[in-house]
Image (cartoon, rainbow, N blue to C red):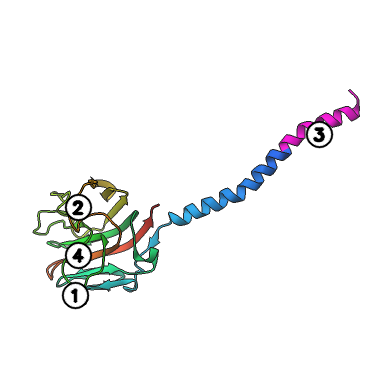
Amino acid sequence: MTQATLQRVIIFLACPVVIIANLVAEEKPDRELADIKSEQVSTWKPLFDGKTLDGWRASENKDSCRVEDGVICVNGPRSHLFYVGEVNDGVFKNFELKCKVKTLPNSNSGIYFHTDFQDEGWPAKGYEAQVNNTGGDPKKTGGLYAVQDVFEAPAKDNEWFDYHIIVNGKRIIVKINGETTADYTEEDDLKREGRRLSSGTFALQAHDPGSKVFYKDVRVKVLP
């Protein structure tokens, strides 16, 4: 084989490699852009700044919802603290919500989701994830109130515990300290009014003057 022939063979064999490398280089920005968009969608967003109630709106008895020592405190006559901030325009359908919660003895509260702001009364729309370790109500922390209840508290008073709510499609999962306490799939032919999946915001409950509950590190991840 002459040197000229050898050079032509090398060039012939190298061409596919160059073409493939160019294709990969062209696809890489597209993949990176897709990865960035996916990461942006799945990023955890804080709902509480640790200083103020900016982005939140209390209903009746507004003084029952306040910030104490950098955490949300709900304590006093009935009130509900609704999220009305900028994250996802305050409307959530499929999501993960995480926060840390601490209850004092004999306290009752709750985390509402798929709800809407209302001036007074117990929220008529959406589900309530119960917060109650030693309060008088037999329905305890980690349950979906009056839907899939928990009757033995999975957490203790005076200790911070992790609360995790996942809503995806028709399925609701509640976890306390990483352990699943409720796993409920809503029926397609559900006749129940109000307490059903749709979309909406979150609300933290101040139940009564004898209940004192704290929330911090409140954050959400929007799911597709």
Give the image location of residue 7, x and y in percent.
86, 31
Marks 1/4 in contact by CB < 8 Å: the verdict is: no
Q: Badge 3 local density, few (<14 within 10 Å), some, or many (20+)? A: few
Label 1 element class: loop
Q: Which residue is mark 2?
A: 144
C-alpha span from label 2 to label 3: 69 Å
**Would you place residue 98 above or below residue 68 in this image?**
above
Label 3 element class: helix
Residue under the image location 12 percent in, 61 percent down: 106
Q: Amino acid at mark 2?
A: Leu
Q: Which residue is mark 4?
A: 123
Going from N to C along the chain, the mark reached first, 1 or 2, is: 1
Q: Amino acid at mark 4?
A: Pro
Residue 12 lies in the magenta stretch? yes
Going from N to C along the chain, the mark reached first, 3 or 4, is: 3
Marks 3/1 in contact by CB < 8 Å: the verdict is: no
C-alpha span from label 3 to label 1: 79 Å
Marks 3/4 in contact by CB < 8 Å: the verdict is: no
Going from N to C along the chain, the mark reached first, 2 or 3, is: 3
Label 2 element class: loop
**Would you place residue 142 above or below residue 103 in this image?**
above
Q: Which mark is residue 11?
A: 3
Q: Which mark is residue 79?
A: none
Which quadrant holds residue 117? bottom left
The label nearer to you, 1 versus 4, is: 4
Q: Magenta span covers which residues? A: 1-17
